[in-house]
Image (tube, helix red, strand yellow):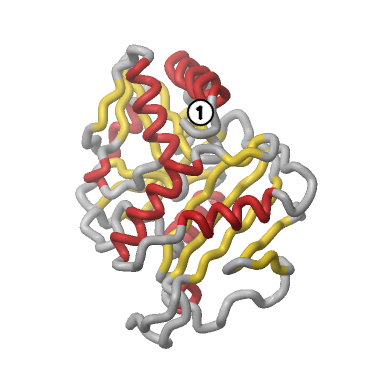
Amino acid sequence: MSEMRIWVDGHLVDPWAPAVSAVDHGITVGDGGFETAKIVRGVPFAVNRHLARLDRTLAGLGLPAPNHDLIRVGIEAVLGAGDEIAFGRLRWTVTGGRGPLASDRDDSPLTTIVTAASQDPPPAFGAVVTSPWVRNERSATAGLKTTSYAENVVALAEAKARGGMEALLANSRGELCEGTGSNVFVVHGDRISTPPLASGCLAGISRELVLEWGRAAGLSIVEEALPIQALASADEVFLTSSIKDVFPVSVLDGRALPHPGPITAQLAGIFAQRSAESSEP
C-alpha cells in the first residue's frame, strides 16, 4: 500500500487514526465536496481551476465558501511531509462539519481535509462498458462534485465485474452523460463531440482543458447532446480525468477500438505538451 499523508483542519494526522468526528455531516449524509488533482514530481496540477470548481460545488450545496488559504496550507503540508511524490493523487475535501444525525444542518464550521498519496501512473488504454444505471440530469446535485459517491461506487464495481475499468452512463433522457470518474469524448470522422454540461455531467478540469487546447489547435470539438447509441458507431472514444489526462478506450462493450486513434493521439500529445508548460494552466 502506498504511503498516505493526511491533514485535517490544520494538523497532519496518522492516516489510520481517528481524525474526523463520527457525526461529521460528510460522513453521516455525504454533505460536502471534494477535488482530486494529479501530482507529478511533487507538483500538483491545475490547483486554481480545482479550487474554483470546489467553490461552485459548495455554493450549489448551499454551504459557505471554502477557505482557499487553509486548503493551500494543507496542500503544502502533505506534499512536504515526506519524500517527493513522483506521481500521485492530491485530494481535498470540505464538508458541512459536525451536524445532527439527519439531513438538517447546524452552524458548525466546515471540516477541511487534504490528503496525498503516491500511485502508479494509469495504463496506456483500457476497456469500458456502458452502465445499466443512469444519471439524473435534474438532480439538485447534478454537475456538482460532492462526497455522495455511492452511485459511482456501485456502477464502477459492476463495470469491473464485466471486465471494464470504467462505466459510461446515460442520463434520464437516454443521452450520453459521463463516466463514474471521467468525462467522455466520441469521434466520428473528424468531428469530436462531448456531452454538454446540461447532460448532467461534471465540468471536468481535463475536459475543460481539452476543449480549450484542442480548439486552439484548430480541431473541431463540439459540446452536443448525443444519444447513448452514438457510442456504437464511434470511430474513437476517449476519456478525460485529472489522473488519466486523455485516455484512449481500447474496447467498448466488447467492440475493439483504435487505442489511440489518430485524433485521440493528437489530443493526447497537445495535452501533454501544454500541461508540461505550466502546472497552473
What is the number of callouts on the image?
Answer: 1
Q: Position of residue 147 (x, y in %)?
A: 45, 63
Quarter occupied by the N terminus:
bottom right
User: Against 95, is 157 above or below?
Assistant: above
- Along the line of sight, the residue nearer the viewer: 198 or 56: 56
At 47% from the left edge and 81% from the top edge, which residue is drawn?
98
At 47% from the left edge and 48% from the top edge, which residue is drawn?
181
Mark 1 lies on a secondary structure that is: strand
- Along the line of sight, the residue nearer the viewer: 174 or 256: 174
At 26% from the left edge and 38% from the top edge, which residue is drawn?
196
| Residue 259 appears in view | no
Residue marked by disc 1:
248
**Looking at numbered disc 1 in the image, what kind of residue is underneath it?**
Pro
277 left or right, relative to 58:
right
At 34% from the left edge and 15% from the top edge, which residue is drawn?
219
Q: Position of residue 108 (x, y in %)?
A: 43, 80
- Along the line of sight, the residue nearer the viewer: 130 or 254: 130
**In the picture, residue 204 is in which quadrant?**
top left
**In the picture, residue 192 is in which quadrant?**
top left
Q: Position of residue 170 (x, y in %)?
A: 31, 47
Q: Position of residue 178 (x, y in %)?
A: 37, 44
User: Which residue extends farthest bottom?
Assistant: 101
User: Against 26, is 74 above or below?
Assistant: above
Dot 1, how many residues are within 10 Å of its Cα: few (below 14), some (14-19), or many (20+)?
many
240 left or right, relative to 189:
right
| Residue 263 appears in view | yes
User: Which residue extends farthest right?
Assistant: 83
User: Against 274, is 58 above or below?
Assistant: below
